[in-house]
Image (cartoon, rainbow, N blue to C red):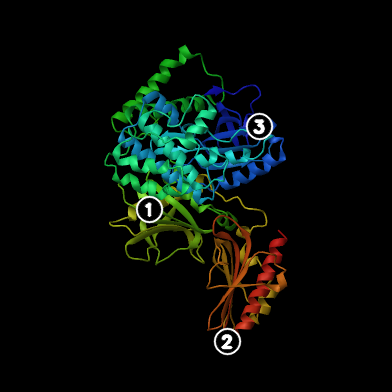
């Protein structure tokens, strides 16, 4: 790292900038520190690129997509400002050498390192592809090595430059030729299989120390990628078949990231980096710590500070060898402060509605306990994943924020942020732990571990504490438009007069959870309104596609399902999001003592129209 230059900014949004990490054709990367003390890597785009409005539009779109990448082995995007004079984005800072630096300095990886690298890259691809993205520029310099495994950076950013010859030299390709897929080298459309090819090329580099397609010139390299078969004879036999499959010229024959992840189970070597790579990681952390202590000031001359720096590195290496905590990098004997000391978790309803639950399964939250395998957003409040623990178990894990806590919610005997941890378990072979944030209804934060052998309650409690720590110290929020249903308070989302007409009587709203509200009148029935991002149902054969209120709600899909007992549910798609999900308004009407389904459905349309009118006034 280098000190900031005279023309470098001192801040990017809320992040104080400390040092220059590096720079390239697209911009420069700076080390920053957030108000809560966490380090960030701020990529600041060159002004000449930012002058192009099409680039800004693409950059803004890619930043929004990148913010959904929150799983294991990726450096999550924490913050961004695509409208700044020099657009920027801030990712979690990863202190460690790049894969390129590790191979150049330490040589090919042993089987244990290859196992950890393969599993980590496969998990990263599952998370990137889950967010509906293709990385496009996977290369050794975009993979950083940490104690927990590899971390992929710069996902989604390459696309901002793609397709505009004003932003790149004429005829150039976005990406790194030696690690491109054949279809990318030929300028053909890309799928997720393109990233798998790039991972195969990196695994071959890691196993042999040599790039499989690198030629004397860029044209020769691209020719090799498209036409030459890679020599995998020096890859350990247990991984050779899967690396060959990754490097198949036909995208259809390459494995999926999940198949790649499962392939490492055949490797018997214990996953872990070599001693030389671990020492590089320690040194990278020590360098970052030194710049934090300098706080943007010019460092002292090298000959005066080198002994002190060497002492820090030597001490950290000694701790590693002795089996001490690998995260310790201290120049004094003080213990790290408790991030939850003297803090409480107090979140408003609006904050609860905007929590990004899948970010709570990110490496920076649960990375010391294991890693998430393809976290999937169930709805705006719930994220589900299969979780791989350090001992190789794969339990199911669900994190919920703003939902009703299950079970009898008995106190478990421990507390976090001054609130008792509750046993919210409702199913056999599972364990759930939560804390209540509201009394009526009893909603809060819950972690559920299921489908696992043995006692997982301790894991559920530990994950809950990690989740609450993140919610308390650095609340992760979704990036949604101003007129987003996710922002709506469902209990105030419609005029009370519309509810009274639909019910035939006045009714007071009663929140069910942070995204649902019910109006109930004894002897008349009830109306429920839900406003959230959820799986779409317009392609579900159980639902009937309809036109609501003569099409006044817009061109997007509306669907309906009814029951023989007179319950009608109408759902309107307000905005598609990613994959099979969208922002939905759901209205259900139950009319007690009446089996008039047409009247119930007419009431759902009336209420739905009222919610859309309220949303449009935001």
Q: Upstream in the sequence, badge 3 or badge 2?
A: 3
Compared with 281, 430 (above or below) is below
Q: Residue at x 52, y 24 (%)?
A: 1
Quadrant location of the C terminus in the rendered image: bottom right
**Residue 102 location, quadrant:** top left
Q: Nearer the viewer, residue 90 or 115?
A: 115
Q: Upstream in the sequence, badge 1 or badge 2?
A: 1
Q: Position of residue 441 (x, y in %)?
A: 51, 66
**Residue 121 location, quadrant:** top left
Q: CA distance from mark 1 to mark 3?
A: 56 Å
Q: Which residue is mark 2?
A: 595
Q: Residue at x 63, y 33 (%)?
A: 171
The residue carrying pointer 2 sits among few (fewer than 14), some (14 to 19) or many (20 or more) residues within 10 Å by Cα, namely some
Residue 398 visible in image: yes
* SS at mark 3 in the image: loop
Tell us which disc is closer to us: 3 or 2: 3
Tell us which disc is closer to us: 1 or 3: 3
Q: CA distance from mark 1 to mark 2?
A: 47 Å
Residue 35 visible in image: no
Q: Upstream in the sequence, badge 1 or badge 3?
A: 3
Residue at far front of view: 227
Q: Position of residue 150 (x, y in %)?
A: 42, 37
Mark sitting on residue 170: 3
Q: Which residue is mark 1?
A: 461
Residue at far top of view: 303
Q: Nearer the viewer, residue 578 or 372?
A: 578
């Amino acid at each position: 790292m280098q000190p900031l230059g005279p023309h470098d900014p001192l801040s990017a949004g809320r992040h104080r900038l400390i040092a220059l990490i590096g720079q390239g054709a697209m911009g420069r990367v700076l080390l920053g520190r957030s108000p809560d003390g966490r380090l960030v890597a701020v990529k600041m785009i060159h002004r000449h690129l930012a002058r192009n409005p099409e680039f800004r539009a693409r950059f803004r779109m890619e930043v929004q997509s990148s913010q959904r990448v929150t799983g294991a082995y990726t450096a999550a995007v924490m913050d961004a400002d695509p409208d700044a004079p020099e657009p920027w984005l801030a990712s979690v800072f990863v202190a460690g050498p790049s894969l390129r630096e590790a191979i150049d300095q330490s040589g090919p990886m042993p089987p244990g390192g290859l196992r950890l690298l393969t599993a980590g890259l496969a998990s990263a691809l599952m998370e990137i592809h889950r967010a509906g993205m293709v990385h496009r520029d996977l290369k050794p310099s975009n993979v950083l090595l940490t104690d927990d495994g590899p971390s992929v950076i710069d996902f989604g950013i390459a696309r901002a430059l793609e397709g505009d010859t004003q932003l790149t030299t004429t005829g150039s390709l976005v990406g790194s030729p030696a690690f491109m897929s054949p279809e990318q080298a030929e300028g053909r459309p890309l799928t997720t299989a393109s990233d798998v090819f790039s991972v195969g090329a990196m695994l071959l580099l890691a196993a042999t120390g040599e790039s499989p397609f690198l030629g004397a010139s860029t044209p020769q390299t691209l020719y090799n990628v498209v036409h030459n078969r890679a020599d995998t004879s020096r890859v350990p036999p247990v991984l050779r078949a899967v690396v060959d499959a990754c490097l198949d010229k036909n995208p259809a024959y390459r494995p999926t990231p999940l198949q790649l992840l499962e392939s490492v189970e055949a490797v018997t070597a214990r996953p872990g980096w070599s001693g030389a790579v671990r020492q590089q990681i320690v040194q990278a952390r020590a360098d970052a710590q030194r710049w934090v202590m300098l706080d943007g000031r010019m460092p002292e001359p090298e000959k005066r500070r080198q002994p002190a720096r060497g002492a820090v590195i030597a001490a950290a290496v000694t701790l590693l060898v002795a089996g001490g905590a690998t995260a310790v990098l201290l120049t004094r004997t003080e213990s790290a402060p408790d991030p939850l000391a003297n803090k409480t978790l107090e979140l408003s309803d609006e904050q609860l509605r905007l929590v990004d639950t899948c970010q709570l399964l990110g490496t920076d939250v649960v990375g010391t306990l294991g890693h998430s395998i393809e976290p999937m957003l169930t709805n705006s409040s719930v994220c589900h994943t299969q979780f791989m623990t350090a001992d190789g178990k794969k339990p199911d894990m669900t994190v919920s924020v703003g939902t009703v806590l299950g079970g009898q919610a008995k106190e478990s005997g421990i507390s976090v942020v001054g609130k008792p941890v509750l046993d919210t378990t409702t199913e056999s072979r599972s364990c759930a732990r939560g804390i209540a944030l509201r009394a009526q209804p009893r909603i809060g934060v819950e972690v559920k571990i299921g489908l696992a052998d043995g006692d997982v309650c301790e894991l559920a409690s530990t994950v809950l504490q990690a989740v609450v720590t993140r919610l308390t110290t650095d609340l992760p929020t979704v990036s949604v438009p101003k007129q987003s249903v996710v922002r709506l308070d469902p209990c105030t989302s419609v005029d009370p007069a519309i509810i009274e007409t639909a019910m035939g009587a006045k009714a007071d709203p009663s929140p069910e959870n942070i995204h649902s509200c019910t109006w109930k009148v004894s002897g008349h029935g009830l109306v429920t309104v839900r406003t959230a991002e959820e799986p779409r149902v317009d392609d579900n054969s159980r639902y009937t596609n309809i036109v609501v209120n003569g099409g006044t709600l817009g061109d997007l899909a509306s669907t309906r399902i009814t029951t023989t007992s007179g319950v009608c549910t109408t759902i309107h798609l307000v905005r598609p999001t990613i994959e099979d999900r969208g922002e939905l308004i759901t209205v259900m009407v139950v009319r007690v003592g009446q089996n008039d389904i047409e009247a119930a459905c007419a009431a759902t349309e009336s209420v739905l129209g009222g919610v859309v009118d309220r949303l449009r006034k935001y």
